[in-house]
Image (cartoon, coloured by chain):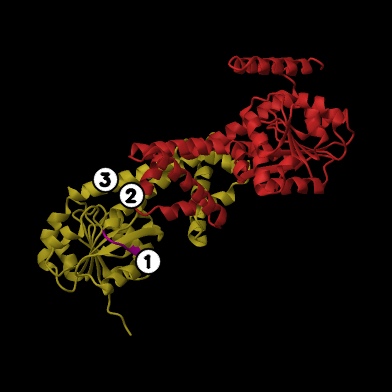
Amino acid sequence: MSVGFIGAGQLAFALARGFTAAGVLAAHKITASSPDTDLPTVSGLRKMGVNFTVSNKDTVKSSDVLFLAVKPPIIPFILEEVGPDIEPRHIVVSCAAGVTISSIEKKLSTFCPTPKVIRCMTNTPVIVREGATVYATGTHADVEDGKLLEQLMASVGFCTEVEEDLIDAVTGLSGSGPAYAFTALDALADGGVKMGLPRRLAVRLGAQALLGAAKMLLESEQHPGQLKDNVCSPGGATIHALHFLESGGFRSLLINAVEASCIRTRELQHLADQEKISPAAIKKTLLDKVKLDSSSLSVASASKVSLFTSKSKKN
Amino acid sequence: MEEPELWVGFVGAGRMAGGLVRGLLQAGKVPASNVLASAPSDRNLGAWRELGCRTTHCNLEVMYRSTLVFLATKPHILPGVLEEIRPAVGAQHIVVSLVAGVTIQTLQRLLPPGTKVLRIMPNLPCVVQAGAMVFSRGSNAGDEEAALLQSLLSSCGLCEEVPESYIDIHTGLSGSGVAYVYLFAEALAEGAVKMGMPGALASRIAAQTLLGAAKMLLETGEHPAKLRGDVCTPGGTTIHALHQLEKGALRATVMDAVEAATKRACEMAKD
């Protein structure tokens, strides 16, 4: 089985790294493509032994499982571009937040009558094989196709099938979740430093504390409330600290965060569905951003940018 | 084997004492005629007489005629009362103080050496036999006295022996705690009234909701967090409501309340 990634950014890198580390896939069975070869992840992928190309079409041709690992607004353009090369054997896996199966199937159906589409929501810790992934299968994806993806994703963490309408909530929780954790860890380390610990040690201990707690919870039958109680001796240090957390509305902040991420995901999907953002506007925004980034880059990159835009001018 | 008759006395006949005696009587542990209560005025004593208890204005009389004596005066009155009854206190007495903020050390200092002293903190629902009480024993009170108190008062609700340091905490948690619950019940009902339900019905339902939830907690022995989770269907009404409570930092506020009451109890004890 060979796997392809359209897009060679953080997600492609994380998944490729995870799959190869897990030994489910040899690096040379993986292809990744992107018009921008200056992404730091591109060199990372190359170092891994992944086949890198600037041609999305090449990726499609050499893959059985095709991951769409680009930002959500780019998905429609990718589908237009590679649609003609999609064959019945392909399993198209979209990891884009807020992009519905039906929107992908609709776009592909102009090229291929029964495209196999699976929608997936994963997260960055796949890179260390502790990802959290859910997937929903599209109209023409068989049970085996889902199981195949599940096998792949289970090699890099937890993976389960869900109904598509839950995926936005998953985005809010475990998709964005690592960011909440990084923020918490940064702050915990600050707390440690304030009380006298060297930064490196504080970070290490904070991360280990969260890792250990998460592991305990996953391996325990007990409710997290009970596990929390087990740590709080009467009148002790921990209960004093927890009181502070409660006073600050810690719990509600986390609930708010998950809710906000989920709602925003739905908003973006809604906007995309209504095509409120015109393709031209999206292109322009991205082009502007690329221009900003490339102002410090070489001329070579600038020409790659124009390659990209001239491609889209075809539409 | 016939148990020796128990003569119970109350010095002070206010709300707390009234709650305890109602519990004792309803549980049939002591006949009303064996109960003698004293108070300076007749204001409260009428209710005791209606229960079938005897009453008096003389504290000494309570000491002479009772073996188990509950001290239930206001804190600032107690020292004077103890001085008054001290001559009549003997080895046969078991003195149980309900007086908030008065430590066992103080009680033992103001009573004859060797007196069997215990200190108890009940709460109001003792009146309906659903109280929560904790007690501690003084240096001369033994297992027998503790067991007697426990057996008499278990009829009023939960009764546990604890180290004296827990008594102020119990005040903050449960003594004052009933007031927190009344506040919560009132707010629940008001929410319902806002949404269109008549007040009286809302109040009854609010109370029953609290009763039912508490009953499930006590009977299942499950962690409250688990029981809470069991009620929360994904995306449903409950989780939406709980989010509002969390936004309002209800948990921290309640912790603050318990802490404030406990600290105040400690402060008052020092006065």
Mark 3 vs mark 1, foreground winner is 3
* Left or right, residue A47 beside residue B163: right
Q: Position of residue A113 (x, y in %)?
A: 90, 34
Q: Amino acid at mark 1?
A: Ser
- Considering only order in the chain, which callout, 1 or 2, is on the residue closer to the N terminus? 1
* Left or right, residue B164 beside residue A211: left
- Considering only order in the chain, which callout, 2 or 3, is on the residue closer to the N terminus? 2
- Whether residue A11 is visible to the viewer of this picture, yes or no, is yes
Q: CA distance from mark 2 to mark 1?
A: 21 Å
For the residues bearing labels 2 and 1, Cβ distance under 8 angstroms: no
Q: Quadrant of the N terminus of chain B?
A: bottom left
- Tell me the residue at 46%/47% (across/down): A209
- Tell me the residue at 33%/39% (across/down): A195
For the residues bearing labels 3 and 1, Cβ distance under 8 angstroms: no
Q: Which residue is mark 2?
A: B172
Q: Give, as a single range, the part of the protein colored magenta.
A: B160-164
Q: Position of residue A200 (x, y in %)?
A: 42, 39
For the residues bearing labels 3 and 2, Cβ distance under 8 angstroms: yes
- Residues B126 and B257: in front is B257
Quarter where residue A2 is shown: top right
State the red chain.
Answer: A
Q: Position of residue B126 (x, y in %)?
A: 37, 58
Q: Amino acid at mark 3?
A: Arg
Name chain B's colour. yellow
Q: Which residue is mark 1?
A: B154
- Considering only order in the chain, which callout, 1 or 3, is on the residue closer to the N terminus? 1
Whether labels 3 and 2 belong to a single chain: the reply is: yes
Q: Chain of mark 2?
A: B
